[in-house]
Image: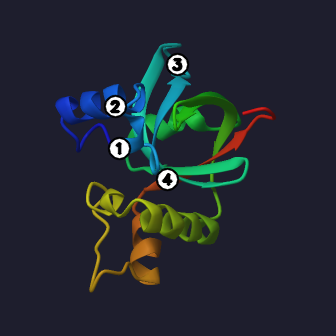
């Protein structure tokens, strides 16, 4: 997302997601906090998400996904509630495509920054396979109990 969205828009999302104005965006957008695996620096980014119970799926085509491998600890602010969890990349391409469809159904605007082609309002299975093969990643966040 960082490559495609101007910093002003990212800053706007982050301000809204962290204030009482969050209902404007937080139904499908969250604030993700993670630590750089090499730098140790803490990063924050707005992210579209799809949630089922204690699992949250996110997607990106940017290289920051590498920080979320192997059960990396993250914090995700969903509807102004901070949740702790562990993240990992969905490695099975079939499962990644299935979860990407759910994310795009929930947050259709994510199709445009990721260069996902939509024809007649739909994303084809072949297009999902193409995008996953081209490097788009889907990550699963497992929320810790109490989150």
Residue 88 image label = none
> At which x and y percent is residue 91?
63, 57
Residues under labels 1 and 4: Cα distance?
Answer: 26 Å
Write down the quadrant of residue 67 in the picture: top right
Q: CA distance from mark 4 to mark 2?
A: 26 Å
Q: CA distance from mark 2 to mark 1?
A: 8 Å
Q: Which residue is mark 3?
A: 38
For mark 3, give the secondary structure: loop
User: Are the two marked residues, 1 and 4, in contact with CB atoms closer than 8 angstroms?
Assistant: no
Q: Secondary structure at mark 4?
A: strand
Task: Give the foreground label among 4 and 2.
Answer: 2
Q: For residue 104, say whether it is visible.
A: yes
**Of 104 and 17, which appears nearest the observer?**
17
Q: What mark, if any, has residue 137 been given in the picture?
A: 4
Q: Of marks 1 and 4, which one's residue comes earlier in the chain?
A: 1
Where residue 118 appears, x then y in whole percent? 29, 76
Q: Residues within 10 Å of mark 1 (few under 14, many from 20)?
A: few
Q: Quadrant of the N terminus?
A: top left
Q: In the structure shown, which secondary structural element does the residue marked by tag 1 occupy?
A: helix
**Closer to the eye: label 2 or 3:** 2
Tell which residue pokes out farthest to the top in this image.
40
Ranked by sequence position, the earlier of labels 4 and 2 is: 2
Q: Is residue 103 above or below residue 44?
A: below
| Residue, disc 2 | 16
Badges 4 and 2: C-beta atoms under 8 Å apart? no
- Distance Cα–Cα, label 2 vs label 3: 30 Å
Mark 2 or mark 1: name the one nearer the start of the chain. Answer: 2
Contact (Cβ within 8 Å) of mark 2 with mark 1: yes
Nearest-to-viewer mark from 3 and 1: 1
Q: Is residue 54 left or right of residue 28?
A: right
Q: Secondary structure at mark 2?
A: helix
Quadrant, the C terminus: top right
């Amino acid at each position: 997302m960082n490559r495609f969205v101007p910093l002003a828009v990212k800053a706007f999302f982050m301000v809204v997601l962290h204030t009482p104005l969050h209902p404007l965006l937080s139904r499908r957008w969250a604030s993700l906090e993670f630590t750089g695996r090499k730098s140790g620096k803490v990063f924050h980014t707005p992210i579209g998400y799809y949630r089922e119970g204690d699992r949250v799926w996110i997607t990106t085509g940017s290289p920051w996904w590498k920080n979320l491998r192997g059960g990396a600890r993250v914090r995700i602010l969903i509807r102004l509630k901070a949740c702790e969890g562990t993240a990992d990349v969905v490695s099975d391409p079939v499962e990644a495509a299935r979860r990407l469809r759910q994310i795009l159904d929930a947050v259709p605007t994510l199709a445009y920054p990721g260069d996902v082609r939509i024809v007649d309002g739909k994303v084809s299975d072949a297009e999902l396979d193409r995008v996953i093969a081209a490097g788009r990643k889907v990550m699963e966040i497992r929320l810790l109990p109490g989150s």
